[in-house]
């Protein structure tokens, strides 16, 4: 009887595992020579991003000033020192991770018409992290 129960329970257990073992909800994108991934809405995406974070040398975070609450729906542009646009994308979550060649870059992030620019220096195998903070405005929930 125990063998029969095991024979029935084990396949059911394995089927359940397969159903829950879904592929990462995040898909890396490529523009030119730059590979990047963005997102972070919901716990599954945030966990997936945390596992990928070490694979990228530029980490960007988008949030509301004061509260630090994450924001989404940000237009991001990454340009090299010569002004050549390498990445132009719409970020649906609070994170964007990119792999860039060593050099100096200008990152522009636009939310609701408000632009914030920051410079980034990518050197060797070090990771550069930048945070972009916008003022919390009436009508903004402040949470993706």
Image (cartoon, rainbow, N blue to C red):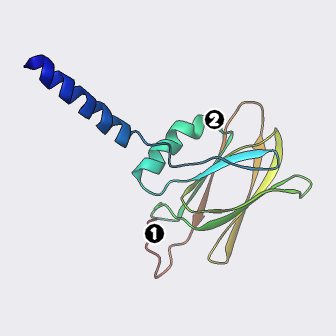
Left or right? Give the position of 95 relative to 110: left
Q: Secondary structure at mark 1?
A: loop
Image coords of residue 113 (percent x, y): 67, 78
Furthest residue to the right? 82
Label 2 sits on residue = 55
Q: Does the CB distance between marks 2 and 1 fall below 8 Å?
A: no
Image height of 110 relative to 13, above or below: below
Instruction: Residue at 72%, 45% (x, y): give it.
Output: 35
Image height of 56 relative to 85, above or below: above
Work out whether residue 91 or residue 116 is closer to the camera in this orientation and state it: 91
Viewer-nearest of discs 2 and 1: 2
Answer with mark 2 or mark 1, whichever residue precedes in sequence. 2
Image height of 48 relative to 82, above or below: above
Please give the count of numbered marks on the rendered protein. 2
User: What is the number of the mark on residue 142?
Assistant: 1
Q: Secondary structure at mark 2?
A: helix
User: What is the number of the mark on residue 115?
Assistant: none
């Amino acid at each position: 009887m125990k063998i029969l129960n095991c024979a029935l329970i084990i396949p059911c257990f394995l089927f359940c595992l397969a159903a829950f073992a879904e592929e990462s909800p995040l898909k890396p994108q490529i523009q030119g020579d730059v590979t990047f991934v963005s997102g972070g809405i919901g716990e599954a995406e945030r966990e997936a991003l945390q596992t990928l974070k070490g694979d990228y040398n530029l980490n960007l975070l988008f949030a509301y000033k004061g509260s630090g609450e994450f924001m989404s729906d940000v237009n991001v542009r990454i340009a090299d020192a010569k002004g050549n646009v390498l990445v132009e994308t719409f970020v649906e979550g609070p994170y964007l991770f990119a792999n860039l060649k060593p050099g100096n870059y200008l990152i522009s992030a636009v939310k609701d018409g408000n632009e914030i620019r920051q410079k980034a220096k990518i050197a060797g195998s070090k990771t550069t992290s930048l945070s972009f903070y916008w003022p919390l405005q009436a009508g903004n929930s402040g949470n993706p």
